[in-house]
Amino acid sequence: MKMVRAIVRPEKENDVVLALEAKGFPAMTKTHVFGRGRQKGLKVGPIHYDELPKVMLMIVAEDPEVPVIIEVIKNSAYVGYEGDGKIFVSPVTESYTIRTGEKV
Amino acid sequence: MLVEITAIIRRDKVAPTMRGLDAMGLGAMTITTVSGRGRQGGNVMTDLDREIPAEYDSVSKITRNLTPASFALVHSLTRPVFWIPKRMLQIVVSSGMKDEVVDMIMSVNRTGWMGDGKIFISPIEDSLRIRTGERGLESV
């Protein structure tokens, strides 16, 4: 089992969520985060923004589903400019549903 | 060996969960305000006079792979709620305490209704207390 964490543009959040839902991944957790990338933020005229608002989506899925999720996010969050975001995949060893106590 | 327990729970269950963890001698945790949607893809606010038709469940699954919230939006039935406010607790413990903590979180948070949340366990390779530089088990 893996946790996929995608940090995407806030304006692309809806596109990504709808694309994932259409592929059968409706369950996820969302946090509003601030970050900066390799460009150390954004410079508009004399003003330097080093904390840019992003949306982090966290999805836990079985290993074979991970490439599908990554492909969906890659296509739906793509704009083509710096700041499109990152996808991180980390291991999850166990997962429980609290309502039923069921272990996956 | 350290593991991280990530519990995504109801907002009103944070205090009882914290009391339970305190009783086990685990005071340290990180709490994040998150929004979540489960397998149902959110929720639907039902008005008493405008009930969702009984067939929405089967129809949405067969025809468009829609979740209840999306179905409600498409058919302008009721107000869909796509994101439900939740709290995420992250606790790093030694792997020996893992089962005990998971059982406690489950018993405190279980109401039996959808939306009780999830618990994820993931491995932590190393941990470091910044103030003293202690590593591993002593640092949590």
Image (cartoon, grey):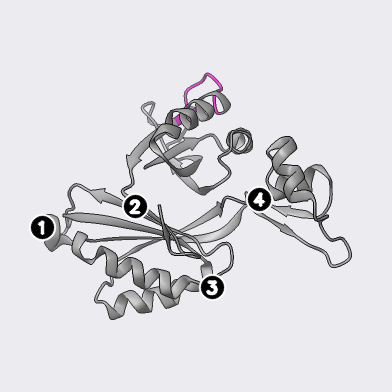
User: As displayed, is residue B5 above or below residue A49?
Assistant: below
User: Is disc 1 placed on a helix, strand or loop?
Assistant: loop
Front one among B49 and B60: B60
Q: Is residue A45 visible?
A: no
- Callout 3 and callout 4 share a chain: yes
Q: Mark 4 points at which residue?
A: B82
In terms of sequence position, does the residue under pointer 3 or pointer 4 come before the other? 4
How much space separates mark 1 and mark 3, taking CA atoms?
A: 39 Å
Q: Where is residue B71 in the image (x, y as percent from the top left)?
A: 75, 45
Pointer 3 local density, CA inside 10 Å: few below 14, some 14–19, many at least 20 = few
Answer left or right for B26 relative to A59. Answer: left
Q: Name the residue under label 3.
A: B111
Magenta residues (range): A77-85
What label sits on residue A94 in the rendered view?
Answer: 2
Front one among A80 and B42: B42
How much space separates mark 4 and mark 2, taking CA atoms?
A: 26 Å
Say which of marks 3 and 4 sits in front.
3
Mark 2 chain: A
Which amino acid type is shown beneath numbered disc 3? Thr
- Callout 1 and callout 3 share a chain: yes
User: Is disc 3 placed on a helix, strand or loop?
Assistant: loop
Mark 1 chain: B
